[in-house]
Amino acid sequence: MKKTTKLLVLLVTTLLFASCNSGDGLQYMPFLDEEGGNWGMIGTDGDVLFTKEFKEMPTVAMNDRFFAKNGDGKWELYATGSKPTVVGKDMYEEAGAFIEDVAPVVMKGKPIQFIDKEGNVAFTLGKVNGKAIEECTNFSDGVAIFKAGQYYGCINSSGKIIVEPQYLFINPANDGKMLAVDKKYENVDRNKGKYTVLSTSGKVISEIPAKSFTDIGKQFVDGALMVEDKSSDGTRREGLIDENGEYIVKPSSKIHNIEDIKDGMFIFYDGDRYGVMDFKGEVVIRAKYRTLHFANKKGLFWAREDRDKSGFVLINDLDETISKEEFYNVQDFHGSYAAVQESENNWIFVNDKGEDQKIKTDIYHIIDDNTGDQIFHSQYFDTNSFINKLDVQPNGFLGLNLTMNAQNIINSIKKIEGAVISTEPSDHTYESYIESDLTINKAEVVISTSFDEYFVSPIESTTTDYYGYTYTETTGYNYKNINPNKISLEIKREGLIIGHMSEVTSKLIEKTKAFGKVVKENKNAVVVQVGSYTYFVANSGQSVYIICGHLDAKNIDISQYEDVTEDSDVSVDIENAIDTTDIDIAADTVVAQ
């Protein structure tokens, strides 16, 4: 499929809470007993664990553990108790809840790790098939999704890889299944691609042709997956399919959207209001509510008839109102109780009959879905992997070289992951350089090529009008068939590369020296003659530069880089060293008679 969404934020923002909301893992929730106060923790039944302990909101507690940030903004692990106790001495840049018996964390300078309840490292996400694991989610249905290179795979709660990184995306697991798209469909038209249904053990269950549906949901629930289709008049319609792509409920004009699925029922939107249907397509609750969602307790829903004038009430699947009053805001049931906002500044707990559960504290605010960070990013910078990714060759790098014309250079940059650049010539008029920001192995870089003239020419048409006047007009633009005078890469001292600038410089110097004759060299810079081209590498302190082009090696001064450190900031300017002798020049304008 030609265009796919990058992991992971879009996939997990609303889905990662599945384990938390099931009620079998959530124990305590962060709460405030007064506006502007410190955070405490309260149980799902309303029993207070402690109050006023944390300035920053902690995560929910699961498996007797939670995380909270210290004054430096670092996460620390705590054991639940009437007085919160720090577990271990480590502090984390990123951390997530103990949805399983392990929790994902990231320490400064290290890869993603999963720790046990004592803070010990259970396993580390290093490399797979020679590629570093860059990102990972927390667990959903016992499976966590990771990214290695450009592709996604899965691990189980023991850290074992159950799905190799061969998918363009994998949606979080639920109901024992995952939805993915294999990398073999990366450059295939969507109508010829397929969705892969995987089990949580990593086995392929089925493949569903993408052309069958306009859109497809993210997770299976009770064996059903939402799909979208469009009628001949363009009206949006949704239905449900099983794991083999067969319809459970066919798309219907009555179902504009399916909002959620649970217990063999689904909430649908008819274009005006929300109601409930079962898997037979029969209406359980007619579409009469402005807001409607499952209360996370079988047969119960939170409903609101008017978004502006009414509050939430608890109803059952017979459309009977259970609660005696309306609530400003509501949360899911976790176990026997749900937290509800009774008034603007007060929350209480109610049972499944909507009855007030007496508690011993005031609750100004309460949160039930803070599981910490959602996506975890490796803080480990692999210099060798980064240098290999640059693909430095005798006449260029990152797939660009000095024999390419502007069109080929732009097309090559477009293929680099994360590049944003237009391929339309009309978007590059009056430009003599091509530039794009990129992220390579977590390092921020700028790739650029420069020309001795504008690399786009207008297509002009000559016309003689009725009165005999001849004039020209621009009808389009073409790329000229000219080559650049140099290709440059600036590697910025930002993010994970901080502390690795000298190492990167040394490896680039070593790499380029192998291509030709060293003209000048010190520990932070080198000039190498490679046939008719010249390579220049320098560490300015704030950036590492590698430049390949038609340069006059003798005119490049490298003395100012001799004593550079990461605190230095030396300017890099070699414009006066560009030699245009061997650069191809083409005509400016194409004229059509």
Image (cartoon, rainbow, N blue to C red):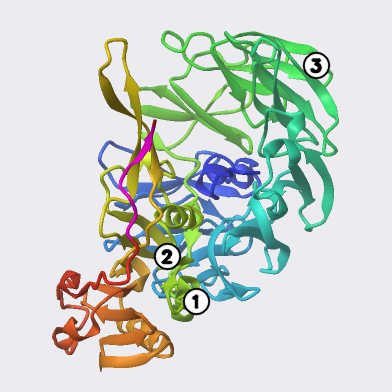
Nearer the camera: disc 3 or disc 1: 1
Residue type beneath disc 3: Gly
Q: Which residues are magenta?
A: 585-592
Give me the residue at 60% from left, 10% from top. Answer: 271
Give me the residue at 23% from left, 80% from top. Answer: 552
Give coordinates of residue 585: x percent, y percent: 32, 59
- Residue at label 3? 281
Decide which of tag 1 and tag 2 comes sooner along the chain: 1
Which residue, as the protein is rendered here, is positioned at the far front?
Answer: 468
Side of 39 where 171 appears, left or right:
right
Which SS class for mark 3? loop
Residue 586 falls within the magenta-colored stretch: yes
Give coordinates of residue 143: x percent, y percent: 68, 56
Decide which of tag 3 and tag 2 comes sooner along the chain: 3
Residue type beneath disc 1: Asn
Q: Magenta residues: mostly which secondary structure?
A: loop
Residue type beneath disc 2: Lys
Give me the residue at 21% from left, 77% from top. Answer: 541
Foreground pick, 289 / 458: 458
Say whether residue 429 is visible.
yes
- Residue at label 2? 442
- Residue at label 1? 388
CA–CA distance in space, label 3 to label 2: 48 Å
Q: Quadrant of the C terminus?
A: top left
CA–CA distance in space, label 1 to label 2: 14 Å
Give coordinates of residue 334: x percent, y percent: 60, 38
Q: Is residue 92 above or below residue 37?
A: below
